[in-house]
Image: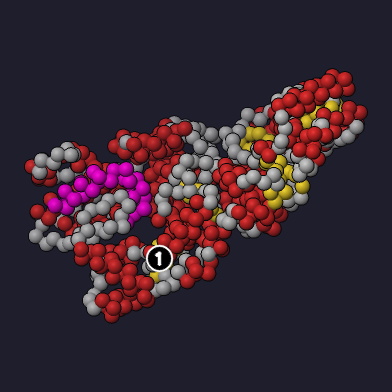
């Protein structure tokens, strides 16, 4: 049963997302709890639900678009206008969002505690302060908002209004400011949050005899509440102890490490450090960079040197940097500075240079948003200079922090790059041809096409053009000429035909199929030989499937010979397909499908998904007769690469090239063990499996 998410369900989903962000270890428990509440909400509405409705797997998949909406560098396979609308509301109008969330809790049958509000004394106190920039109502609303947020996300145990002494309030504020999600959500409200916290602290100090100093530190990204000189000095002392005694990281989960830290602090500084474990742990976290459960102190010289390396390449025109290459090129001195992996380098960069666009395997230094392909093509074009030809090696030496496989990928997909010879490319703009020469080519091609149906490149490219472009191969010349005339002509091997005529072969096959009740693949192959002299098997398969139903490997029949019960078939598929995609060969329960006039097999299932299903479609890299392809939900409009990444992530396969290839071949998602973008597939699959996509 598929029902679109409404605003109340989405509000609960967003609330759960932030709870998971704060405590990833409880992810499964939180998702299970949400599933029960959403199913309960549906039952209270009077809906009849099945086992699939808002189940754990479905909710897990829906967390990806929510994560993407908050953190655009986390990719997603799907999106939803409702999700985007509610995330925007969460960012722009938290008061309205909280109202919807409160209603959602009631609809789900949750017991809501009565929320305590500020005392009349504080309201009177704040009015007496005669604050010019913000009204008392704005201050109270801000404190109420951050209080509710932090209680809902288990950052603090009780609301701000339930804290009646400065010490308790300061401890709560420290926990808030050390929390990552709090800093992200309230980043835009820095000024008023800062003022509101400072005022409430002053109010409590005015009404509390036992007042302790503020422990808020200068490391907070959102709220820079005044930090006294003692707190600053204390932070430096902590950093000094970490750097001297824990050069290879401080494990803040270990009580033994914490005991060692206290002993070293007393030995080095001559006084005891903070008693409170939570406060001390957070101060230690703020003193360095967190990586793999440890805190590392990174020197300012190291940060400066990293920036110098990056800026040198930026000055040379490079804008895309891959963490792996950046780390390997500087590995020796990075190890000396205790930066021990590319992942750790990435964490440092994300803290120090927030202006860059950070992705899973790379970052882009330009402020304008762009895809990986756009950034790669831009950098390759920039370093190409005046050369007519460039080899893989040359470009790799010019783009120090781009892996060779990414350069190859960009050259193969970039619209203005043309293959010339082994590991060598040229660009469309390097092709020398005048307007008059181009006009002559078009006229020759038109005349020859009128006379005999096609024109070879040898016939239409003059010797003058060959001479002027002497560095280019015949293949490159043909492709470059076609690039200039493609609006009027179609390419067919070493010849061109008038635009549109390239579809004549497919049209003839379709016409033939529609004249038959039954036909075989052998007949269609012979038809193509008669028409063209060769067999292009994908063309035959694609054309035949568009006109007939394939009932087995060898036979096609007209549509009226098959009777599909679409509703029942789609219901079976809906229950079997977890997530958005399933490999064709993973389907094996043909006995559950209603009889349609022919015995079910993968060829018949493919035909059904191609043209008849209301919920699913068939996708593949190349049309084939080996049952290689995928069954995909229609609302999922992503690339085949992303579909394979989701399928791999959902499987139990180990994330290495051999095991992934074995899985993709056996499931039917891939036809052969050849894929240029395997590295990215492994990264994406891992991120999906970890819940970061």
Q: Is residue 419 left or right of residue 165?
A: right
**Under tag 1, what secondary structure?**
helix
Residue in view at x 23 percent, y 61 percent = 215
Residue 85 point in image, percent of width and height: 41, 33
> Within the magenta stretch, is there residue 96?
no
Residue in view at x 61 percent, y 51 percent = 680
Residue 446 point in image, percent of width and height: 80, 21
The magenta stretch is: 178-202
Task: Identify which residue, 435 or 293, lies in the foreground.
Answer: 435
Q: State which quadrant residue 294 falls in.
A: bottom left
> Within the magenta stretch, is there residue 192?
yes
Residue 479 point in image, percent of width and height: 75, 36
Q: Quadrant of the N terminus?
A: top right
Residue in view at x 79 percent, y 22 percent = 443
Task: Identify which residue, 31 or 547, lies in the foreground.
Answer: 547
Q: Which residue is mark 1?
A: 301
Residue in view at x 71 percent, y 26 percent = 435
- Magenta highlight: main SS: helix
Residue 451 point in image, percent of width and height: 88, 20
Q: Is residue 658 left or right of residue 83?
A: right
Colouring rule applied to residues? secondary structure
Task: Identify which residue, 109 or 199, lies in the foreground.
Answer: 199
């Amino acid at each position: 049963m598929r029902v679109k998410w409404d605003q109340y369900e989405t509000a609960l989903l967003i609330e759960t997302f932030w709870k998971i962000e704060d405590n990833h270890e409880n992810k499964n428990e939180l998702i299970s709890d949400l599933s029960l509440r959403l199913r309960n909400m549906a039952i209270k509405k009077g809906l009849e639900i099945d086992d699939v409705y808002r189940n754990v797997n479905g909710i897990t998949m829906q967390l990806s678009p929510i994560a993407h909406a908050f953190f655009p560098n986390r990719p997603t396979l799907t999106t939803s206008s409702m999700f985007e609308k509610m995330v925007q509301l969460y960012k722009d109008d938290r008061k309205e969002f909280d109202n919807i969330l409160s209603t959602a809790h009631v609809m789900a049958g949750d017991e809501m505690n009565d929320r305590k509000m500020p005392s009349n004394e504080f309201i009177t106190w704040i009015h007496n302060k005669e604050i010019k920039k913000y009204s008392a109502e704005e201050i109270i609303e801000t404190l109420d908002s951050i209080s509710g947020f932090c209680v809902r996300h288990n950052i603090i145990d009780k609301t701000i209004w339930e804290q009646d002494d400065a010490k308790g309030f300061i401890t709560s504020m420290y926990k808030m400011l050390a929390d990552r999600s709090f800093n992200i959500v309230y980043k835009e409200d820095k000024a008023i949050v800062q003022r509101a916290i400072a005022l409430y602290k002053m109010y409590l100090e005015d009404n509390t005899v036992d007042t302790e100093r503020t422990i808020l530190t200068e490391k907070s990204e959102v709220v820079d509440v005044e930090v006294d000189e003692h707190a600053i000095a204390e932070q430096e002392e902590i950093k000094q102890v970490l750097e001297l005694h824990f050069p290879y990281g401080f494990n803040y989960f270990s009580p033994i490490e914490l005991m060692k830290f206290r002993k070293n602090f007393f030995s080095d500084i001559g006084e005891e450090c903070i008693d409170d474990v939570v406060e001390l742990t957070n101060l230690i976290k703020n003193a360095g960079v967190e990586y793999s459960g440890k805190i590392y102190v990174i020197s300012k010289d190291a940060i400066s040197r990293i920036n110098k390396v990056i800026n040198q390449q930026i000055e040379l025109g490079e804008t895309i940097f891959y963490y792996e290459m950046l780390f390997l090129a500087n590995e020796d001195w990075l190890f000396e500075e205790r930066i021990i992996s590319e992942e750790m380098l990435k964490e440092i960069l994300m803290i120090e240079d927030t202006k860059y666009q950070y992705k899973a395997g790379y970052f882009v230094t330009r402020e304008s948003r762009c895809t990986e392909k756009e950034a790669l093509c831009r950098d390759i074009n920039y370093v190409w200079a005046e050369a007519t030809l460039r080899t893989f090696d040359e470009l790799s030496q010019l783009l120090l922090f781009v892996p060779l496989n990414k350069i190859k990928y960009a050259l193969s997909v970039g619209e203005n790059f043309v293959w010339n010879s082994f590991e060598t490319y040229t660009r469309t703009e390097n092709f020398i041809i005048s307007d008059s020469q181009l006009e002559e080519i078009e006229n020759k091609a038109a005349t020859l096409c009128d006379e005999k149906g096609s024109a070879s490149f040898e016939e239409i490219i003059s010797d003058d053009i060959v001479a002027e472009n002497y560095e280019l191969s015949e293949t490159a010349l043909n492709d470059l000429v076609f690039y200039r005339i493609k609006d009027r002509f179609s390419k067919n091997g070493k010849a061109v035909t008038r635009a549109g005529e390239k579809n004549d072969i497919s049209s003839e096959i379709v016409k033939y199929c529609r004249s038959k009740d039954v036909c075989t693949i052998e007949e269609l192959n012979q038809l193509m030989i008669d028409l063209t002299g060769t067999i292009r098997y994908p063309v035959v398969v694609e054309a035949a499937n568009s006109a007939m139903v394939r009932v087995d490997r060898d036979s096609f029949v007209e549509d009226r010979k098959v009777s599909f019960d679409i509703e029942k078939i789609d219901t079976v598929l809906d229950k079997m397909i977890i997530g958005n995609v399933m490999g064709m060969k993973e389907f094996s329960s043909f006995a559950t499908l209603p009889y349609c006039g022919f015995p079910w097999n993968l060829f018949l299932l493919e035909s059904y998904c191609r043209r008849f299903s209301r919920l699913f479609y068939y996708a593949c890299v190349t049309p084939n007769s080996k049952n290689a392809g995928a069954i995909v939900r229609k609302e999922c409009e992503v690339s085949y690469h992303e579909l394979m990444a989701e399928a791999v992530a959902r499987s139990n396969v180990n994330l290495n090239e051999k095991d992934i290839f074995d899985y993709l071949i056996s499931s039917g998602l891939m036809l052969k063990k050849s894929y240029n973008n395997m590295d990215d597939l492994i990264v994406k699959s891992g991120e999906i499996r970890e819940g970061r996509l």
